[in-house]
Amino acid sequence: MTNIPVITIDGPSGAGKGTVSQRVAKHLGWHTLDSGAMYRVLALAAYQHDIALKNETALANLATDLKVHFEPLSSGTQVILEGQDVSREIRTESCGAAASQIATLPAIRQALLVRQRAFRQTPGLVADGRDMGTVVFPDASHKVFLTASCEERANRRYKQLKEKGIDAKLADIVIEITQRDKRDRTRTIAPLTAAQDAQVIDTTGISIEKVVASILDKKS
Ligand code: DC
C-alpha cells in the first residue's frame, strides 16, 4: 500500500465516468486511468492475434505482456497498441461487448489488476471503471459511483459515437447497454457494484460541471 491519493469513479457504461474523471484529474493535476480501455484494448489484441475470447490462459499471458501505451491528451486518452493508434477502434460497441466478455475471466482480471495499480503515481490518480473502488484501489481516498437511467446513458453513448464519426443505431445501443450491464453486474468476480463507502451520484439530467463540483467538494 502507498499513501499516494486515488479517487475511484465506478459505474455502468455511459454514466459519464470518462468525462467526469478527465475533468476531476485536470482540476487536481493528477494522472488518469481508464481501466475500461485496458479491457477494450485486450479484446482488440485478442482479435488481432487470433486468440479466442474464451482462451483464458492465452489472454492472461497476452494481458501481462501486451505492448500498450496510454497517452493523456486534452481530449481524452490516446491508446497505442503495438505501435498503432487504436483510440477510435476500441470505442466501437462490438469491442465493448468483447471487453465485457473477457472481463468475466479471473486470470485476465488479475493480470490487468497488476498493470492498473502501476498507474498510482504522484501527485495522485483518478481511476475509472467497474471495480476501482471495490477491488483495485480499496484504500482509495475518495470513492464515487455514478449512475444514470438506461435511456440517458444510451443517448449519451449515441452522441459520443456520432461525434467520433462512428456509425451506430440508438436502438442497438439500448440493447447492447442492457446486456453489458447485466453481464457486468452479475459476474462472480469483481461485479459492478458501489463500494460501501462510495459517494453515489445519479447523473440523470445533471450537468457534468455539477457532478465534478460535487466530487471535488466531498473529496476535500
Ligand atoms: O468502461 P468501458 O465501457 O470502456 O468498459 C468496457 C468493458 O470492460 C465493460 O463492459 C466491463 C469491462 N470493465 C471491467 O470489467 N472492469 C473495469 N474496471 C473496467 C471495465
Image (cartoon, rainbow, N blue to C red):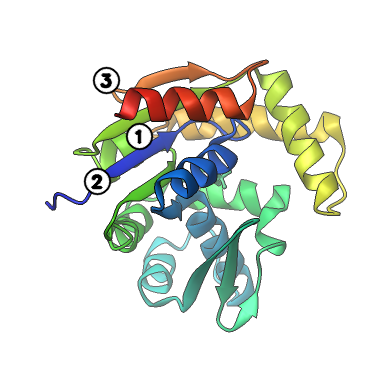
**C-alpha separation, residue under disc 2 versus residue under disc 3:** 19 Å
Q: Judging from the image, what secondary structure is the residue with disc 2 in? A: loop
Residue 72 appears left or right of 127: right
Q: Judging from the image, what secondary structure is the residue with disc 1 in? A: loop
| Quarter occupied by residue 193 | top left
Residue 100 appears left or right of 171: left
Q: Residues within 10 Å of mark 1 (few under 14, many from 20)?
A: few
x and y, in percent, of residue 39 in the image: 50, 55
Residue indicated by mark 1: 188
- Residue type (three-letter) at the residue carrying disc 3: Gln
x and y, in percent, of residue 216 in the image: 40, 30
Residue indicated by mark 3: 196
x and y, in percent, of residue 192 in the image: 42, 31
- First-in-chain label (3 vs 1): 1
Residue indicated by mark 2: 5
150 is higher (above) or lower (below) than 96? above
**C-alpha separation, residue under disc 1 versus residue under disc 2:** 28 Å
Residue 177 appears left or right of 35: right
Some atom of ligand 1 lies within 8 Å of the CB belonging to the residue at label 2: no
Q: Judging from the image, what secondary structure is the residue with disc 3 in? A: loop
